Amino acid sequence: MRKIGINQAEIDSTKIIEDSECCLVVPAIIAREGVFKHPEGMVYYPADEIREAAWTAENVWIVAEKHPDTLILTDRYEIKGRVENPIFSSDISGIIANLRFYKKFNDPNFLADIKSGKRKDVSWGYFYDEDLTSGEWQGQHYDSVRRNFLVNHVAAGVPVGRCTWPYCGIAVDQVIRKPAADPWEETEDYIRSGHKEPSDTCRTIDISEEQGIKAITCKYGDKWDIQSYLFSKEKGWTKEKAQAWFNEHKTADSVEVSQPTMEVDPLKEIERAKRLLGS
């Protein structure tokens, strides 16, 4: 049975290919081999299947901040750019491509966030065939395999990626590193705790702008919990300091952050989360 799926990657826009009156162009890794958590379990994305699908990403449209509500792109007004020159790289077992954003279709603040690194995540939408064969990849168990990918679109500026930078995303000069067993990740800008698997619905909140601490919150069932923390290295955070802070505040992992609705003020929810975390 043919299905529609999405998988995410995190951006680091330290490399800009073009910043002209017309367009902003940045390089990205939009897909990579690995085992990723989905609602139905752990899913394996084989390198061979990604390699065969690389050419189908040529000139697919880019959308902003989230995937279309229909999961496939059906509205031309959602188009913000296109994907160029997708190539499968055996060095990273993934697809490298350029993302071209059309400035006339994008909010200038959104593009500024892409350039500054505030919008770090991309996510690809695709058709696939499901293979229910289970197994292991590099010691990681998986429950099923996705095959026969056909790329439909790429979403930029989504809240959080399953395959995060520097393993996926923009600025591909730092992605040759192999994922480590240590759940703590150090990037050029952040120390990131990885104490929980992300879900399909996540968003980022500021815990303390002064201290340089953010939290990625994800929806698990009917509740929102903190998936991981981001500690800004610009504010002096090291891995050791971040781990000490996390150990002191880890009881706050179960803080619930409500999904914004007409009845819920998201700003009040963020302030409530900050108070509960003792910042």
Image: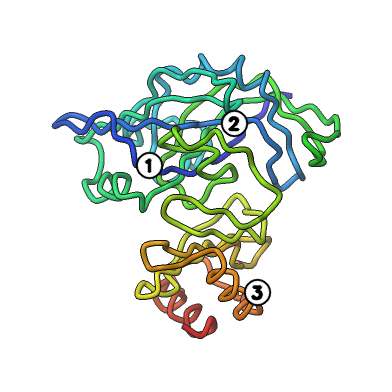
How far apart are labels 2 and 3 at the CA level? 30 Å
Q: Is residue 248 above or below residue 257?
A: below
In this rendering, the label closer to the viewer, 2 or 1? 2
**Between disc 2 and disc 3, whose residue precedes?**
2
In this rendering, the label closer to the viewer, 1 or 3? 3
Callout 1, which amino acid? Ala
- Residue 32's label in the rendered image is 2
Residues at discs 1 and 3 in contact (Cβ within 8 Å) = no
Image coords of residue 87 (percent x, y):
49, 18
User: Which type of secondary structure does the marked residue at label 3 adopt?
Assistant: helix
Name the image quarter holding residue 26: top left
Of 65 and 100, which appears nearest the observer?
100
Reading the image, the residue beneath label 1 is 64
Given the current orientation, which residue lies at the most extreme left position? 21
Image coords of residue 8 (percent x, y):
54, 41
Name the image quarter holding residue 78: top left
Q: Is residue 7 left or right of residue 46?
A: left
User: Which type of secondary structure does the marked residue at label 1 adopt?
Assistant: strand
Callout 3, which amino acid? Ser
For image coordinates 49% across by 42% down, the residue present is 69
- Residue 254's label in the rendered image is 3
In this rendering, the label closer to the viewer, 2 or 3? 2
Q: Is residue 158 above or below residue 271?
A: above
Given the current orientation, which residue lies at the most extreme right position? 134
How far apart are labels 2 and 1 at the CA level? 21 Å
Image coords of residue 65 (percent x, y):
41, 46
